[in-house]
Image (spheres, rainbow, N blue to C red):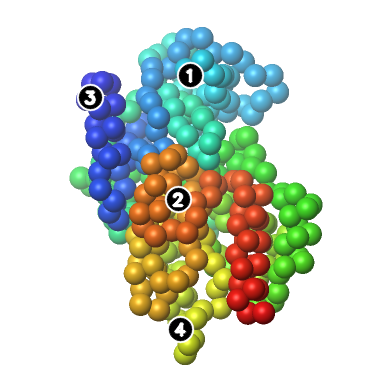
Amino acid sequence: MQQDQLFAEIDKRTQLALSNEMEMLTFYLSDKQLYGLNVFKIIEIVETPREISRIPRSHPTIKGEINFRGHPINLIDLSEYLGLEPVDYRNKISYTLICEYSGTTQGFLVSQPNILVTKGWEEIIKPAGNIYESSCLTAITYHEGTPIQLLDVEKVLNDIVGIDIQISRELVEKGRQVTAKTHHILAVDDSKAACLLIEAVLGQMGIVHTVVDEAPKALALLEKSIRPDGSTPYTMVFTDIEMPVMDGFTFTRTVKNHPQLGKTYVAINSSLSNKSNQDKARQMGADDFIPKFTPDNMARIVIEQIEKANQHTA
């Protein structure tokens, strides 16, 4: 597929009506295996520039900075991060996926983009076993019998550039003042790095919380917890968008259309933080949208909802 056709196809597919599907760009790394990335994360695909500025004392997988629309961005070699042979970008043609994550722009060095593939989230399999617990592999799917590995890019970025999990002292103190043991927050996310941040933020505030890795598990917990008066013990729910089996948009819509769970406060917490996805979150009935890895934003939303809940029970 020609690059211009690929860009046009990405633009077309990102405008598709919402469904429990994922549109992914498949690509090759130096091991010649197929990997996949949600097209919503991709801003542009470019041939890797020849001019790359080295960054002293940076992570070894950051090859330097490249110029993207007048701004320097990191160029990260995903192959080298995975322990594979680095991409020989100096002597061979290679490509860079320009991606947006929680308001930051990163460049991922790949050997070759391949094709776009549409998969229902029920076709995307979360791997099981101890070997995957510490890996950056978040899911696997298949296209015409060929495996496609989906990377936990949030974990990759956490390992390479770091993620701030600390909230401000002011919000910690305020959170502890308004928190009561009766409050319980439910969160669903399949990214290990995102779960770490959620647990760290809520833990700092002394809030009881439950974190699960699939939307059906969260939905089952909500339905099981329904009291005779129709309420649940969960003050609010956080959900990611990209998850195997059921995506966050479908989960949000299901909760909001549920005859007994419709009033549950649902905040989408995603690295797909562009305006288009925020608009879609509102269409699905989400009460709020929080870009991932912004701990103070998460803490503020939690405090606001707990204060409102306290007023209703006062």
N-term-proximal mark, 3 vs 1 = 3
Q: Which residue position is annotated with label 1?
A: 68
- First in residue order: circle 4 vs circle 1: 1
Q: Position of residue 196 (x, y in %)?
A: 62, 54
- Quadrant of the rendered image containing residue 151: top left
Front residue of 303 and 43:
303
Q: For numbered disc 2, what is the local secondary structure? A: strand
In this view, the residue in front, 85 or 27, is 27
Left or right: 193 with respect to 181?
left
Quadrant where the N terminus is found in the figure: top left
User: What residue does disc 2 label?
Assistant: 138
Three-letter code, disc 3: Gln
Question: How far apart, in angstroms, are the residues tagged by discs 2 and 4?
Answer: 35 Å
Give residue 229's mark: none
Q: Which residue is mark 3?
A: 5
Mark 1 residue crowding within 10 angstroms, few (<14) / some (14–19) / many (20+): some
CA gap between label 3 and label 2 equals 29 Å
Disc 4 crowd, CA 10 A, few/some/many (<14, 14-19, 20+):
few
Residue 305 in the figure: left or right of residue 49: right
Q: CA distance from mark 1 to mark 2?
A: 28 Å
Q: Earlier in the sequence, mark 1 or mark 2?
A: 1
Q: Is residue 199 left or right of residue 125?
A: right
Residue 171 as seen in the image, left or right of residue 281: right
Name the residue at 43% across, 17% down. 48
Mark 2 belongs to which amino acid? Thr
Dot 3 alpha-carbon crowd within 10 angstroms: few under 14, some 14 to 19, many 20 or more: few
For the question of whether residue 308 can be seen, the reply is yes
Q: Which residue is mark 4?
A: 230
* Marks 2 and 4, the one that precedes in the sequence: 2
Dot 4: what SS? loop
Q: Are marks 1 and 2 in contact (CB under 8 Å)?
A: no
For the C terminus, which image quadrant?
bottom right
